């Protein structure tokens, strides 16, 4: 099975990592729209247009399925992408809710959803969780965290100040939905900030979800990952390689082939 993974920038690498670790895809094509990140504070119509342009990018590749490794695009553009694509397009919001239910079944648990402005303002996570019986659901848009991750800042005084800026007045949650695929990269900082808390990760969530729906076939011995970006491909390649290094060490032959848009 060959799949595409799409994000506005580097955040989707967290989902890519989970998919590579699952070892059942022959080829994974990663596309990060680094020239236009962040998406999370942009107009709906703009994000829909970018999402459709991403589909045009994937039209040049043979993919059997597209994983939208971006909560913002999943919230805003999944429906229209479904209509246009002739392969399954799966987003991360529904899997995230399922994963939370599995990890924290107690409906009295205090759940906090964090993500971009678009994701939080759409209310999709909040509505879904409330319809599943969760009584205490809070949500907080934390867009600066995306910029910190894109900048390679995962901890330190700037990170601490931004965490305080957003969460100082928040009661300590039992579980946090990382409703932005950039956020698993700062999981350590979030754990230090909140202490003992369950973090729900879009990458792990989508693997569980694909598995439960029979999308994942047999294990394959090797997986080829190709990186593409709309800007600064060498940086995406470097970060992507570093990020996958310990996953690939555990596999026989993960071959990473790095290419840039327009340089095929
Ligand atoms: N990684 C993205 C998400 O999951 C989007 C971040 C952004 O582009 O603002 O929402």
Image (cartoon, rainbow, N blue to C red):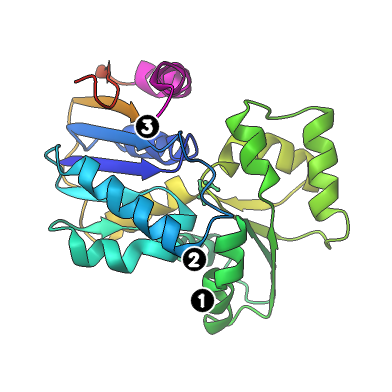
Residue 17 on the magenta span: no
Q: Which residue is mark 3?
A: 230
Asked if labels 1 and 2 touch by Cβ distance under 8 angstroms, the answer is yes
Give the mark, 2 or 3, whose residue is nearer the N terminus.
2
Asked if labels 3 and 2 touch by Cβ distance under 8 angstroms, the answer is no
Q: Neighbour class for label 1 at 10 Å: few (<14), some, many (≥20)?
A: some
Examine the rendered structure and indicate whether residue 45 appears above or below residue 230: below
What residue is at 48 percent from the left and 60 percent from the top?
Answer: 96
Residue 242 on the magenta span: yes
Q: Toward the viewer: 3 or 132?
A: 3
Give the mark, 3 or 1, whose residue is nearer the N terminus.
1
- Residue 46 on image: x %, y %: 44, 57
Distance between the alpha carbons at the discs numbered 2 and 3? 30 Å
What residue is at 30 percent from the left and 58 percent from the top?
Answer: 90
- Residue 95 on image: x %, y %: 41, 61
Q: Which residue is mark 2?
A: 97
SS category of the residue bearing label 1 = helix
Q: Nearer the viewer, mark 3 or mark 1?
A: 3
Rendered image: mark on residue 128: 1
The residue range painted magenta reads 230-250
- Residue 135 on image: x %, y %: 68, 80
């Amino acid at each position: 099975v060959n799949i595409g993974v799409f994000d506005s920038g580097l955040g989707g690498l967290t989902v890519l990592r989970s998919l590579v670790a699952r070892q059942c895809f022959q080829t994974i094509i990663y596309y990060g729209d680094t020239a236009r990140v962040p998406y999370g504070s942009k107009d709906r119509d703009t994000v829909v247009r970018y999402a459709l342009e991403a589909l045009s990018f994937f039209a040049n590749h043979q993919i059997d399925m597209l994983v939208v490794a971006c909560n913002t695009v999943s919230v805003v553009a999944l429906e229209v992408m479904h209509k246009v694509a002739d392969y399954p397009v799966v987003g991360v919001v529904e899997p995230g809710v399922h994963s939370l239910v599995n990890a924290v079944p107690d409906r009295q648990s205090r759940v906090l959803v964090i993500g971009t402005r678009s994701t939080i303002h759409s209310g999709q996570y909040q509505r879904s969780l409330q319809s599943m019986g969760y009584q205490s659901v809070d949500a907080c848009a934390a867009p600066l965290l995306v910029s910190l991750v894109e900048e390679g800042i995962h901890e330190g005084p700037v990170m601490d100040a931004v965490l305080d800026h957003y969460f100082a007045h928040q009661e300590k949650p039992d579980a946090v939905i990382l409703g932005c695929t950039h956020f698993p990269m700062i999981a350590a900082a979030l754990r230090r900030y909140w202490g003992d808390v369950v973090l729900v990760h879009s990458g792990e969530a989508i693997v569980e979800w694909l598995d439960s729906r029979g999308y994942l076939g047999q294990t394959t011995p090797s997986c080829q990952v190709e990186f593409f970006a709309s800007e600064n491909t060498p940086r995406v390649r470097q970060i992507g390689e570093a990020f996958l290094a310990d996953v690939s060490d555990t596999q026989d032959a993960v071959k990473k082939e790095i290419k840039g848009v327009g340089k095929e």
